[in-house]
Amino acid sequence: MVEKYIAQIEAEIRKKKFGSAPRSLYEPIRYILTLGGKRIRPLLTLLSYSVYRADAERVVPYAVAIEMFHNFTLMHDDIMDQAPLRRGKATVHQKWSVSTAILSGDVMLVKVYEQFLGLEENKLKQVLSRFNQCAAEVCEGQQWDMEFETASKISERQYINMIRQKTAVLLGFSLELGAILAEAPVADQHLLRDFGINIGIGFQLKDDLLDVYADQKKFGKQVGGDILANKKTFLLTQAMKKAHGKQKEKLHKLISAKKFKPSEKIKAVREIYDDLKIREVTTERMNDYFNKGFALLAQLSQKEKANTLREFTKNLIDRQS
């Protein structure tokens, strides 16, 4: 089922025209959408829909709208992060220009709304209302993430709220959208949304963990990249809270150092994490969110039909990259 849905999503992306002139405005949209990716968000929409109905192909265009919005955020995030690469290829602002990337991202967001206009009138208002709330929270999360870069310290609560907004709410909306389109009970719509949010928080905590402890051969980027960037991940926020005395001094020195050997910094910070059992703390919190999510899924009115969604999510959790 998942492979069939991926094929339908890719076919829908390929056939979209977006616009023709000026070519430099629309070509970047086609470019970023065809760079690949796991298509997790539109897949979640279709899997959620399929819990209640068997004609998921009918809602593929709306699932693709979510993928378009996700890529709009990536295009703008890459500008803010000054990232040279996206999925191993040049980012849009590198291949064209920052100004073009901003405009292309803007028109891609417009096309998301255009895609939703195909909805039946009785669903359009609800979908746009829920999408607008989600989109605003994604922007809020990104702003918090940028502000945290210069903050001396942040709390666990602040960090969890940031990743909930920046990452998790879009997973939640993707699932909620499928339920809305399938006319699932309102209670199920909320359960699926909250399932996605909890799973999304768990995914980000796992990403934080993999960045420090992954097998480099299996990891898709440099292990320890967050450490080198002094990124305030869950692991760092916990270490800063738990460290005392000389250990705390050493951690602050490592974070504030302007000159260092990357391998030595990664090794030193990881040793502090090991001493403080940060890996265990992060794993426990991550599993708390995963377990809470699956408990919500078990409350669905059609829970016996959610096996594919459940297994797909578990496979994502088990990934090592």
Image (spheres, rainbow, N blue to C red):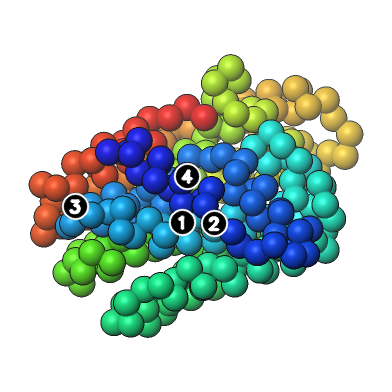
**Identity of the amino acid at label 3?**
Ala
**Closer to the N terminus: mark 2 or mark 1?**
2
Marks 2/1 in contact by CB < 8 Å: the verdict is yes
Cα distance between the residues tagged 3 and 4: 20 Å
Label 4 secondary element: helix
Q: Earlier in the sequence, mark 2 or mark 3?
A: 2
Q: Residue at label 3?
A: 54
Q: Nearer the viewer, mark 2 or mark 1?
A: 2
Task: Give the residue pinned by disc 4.
Answer: 10
Which of the numbered marks, if any, corresponds to residue 89? none
- Mark before the other along the chain sequence, 1 or 3: 3
For the residues labelled 2 and 4, say whether their Cβ atoms are less than 8 Å apart: no
**Gap between marks 2 and 4, in whole Å?**
10 Å
Amino acid under label 2? Lys
Residue occupying the point 35% across, 50% down: 44
For label 1, the SS is helix
Residue type, label 1: Val
Q: Which residue lies furthest to the top in this view?
A: 217
Q: Identify residue for label 1.
A: 64
The mark nearer the N terminus, 3 or 4, is 4
The residue nearer to you, when weighing 232 against 83, is 83
Q: Is residue 136 above or below residue 286?
A: below
| Residue at image point 54% right, 56% down | 16
Measured in 3D between alpha carbons, the distance from the residue under mark 1 to the one under mark 3, in whole angstroms, is 18 Å
Q: Can residue 41 be seen in this view?
A: no
Distance Cα–Cα, label 2 vs label 1: 10 Å
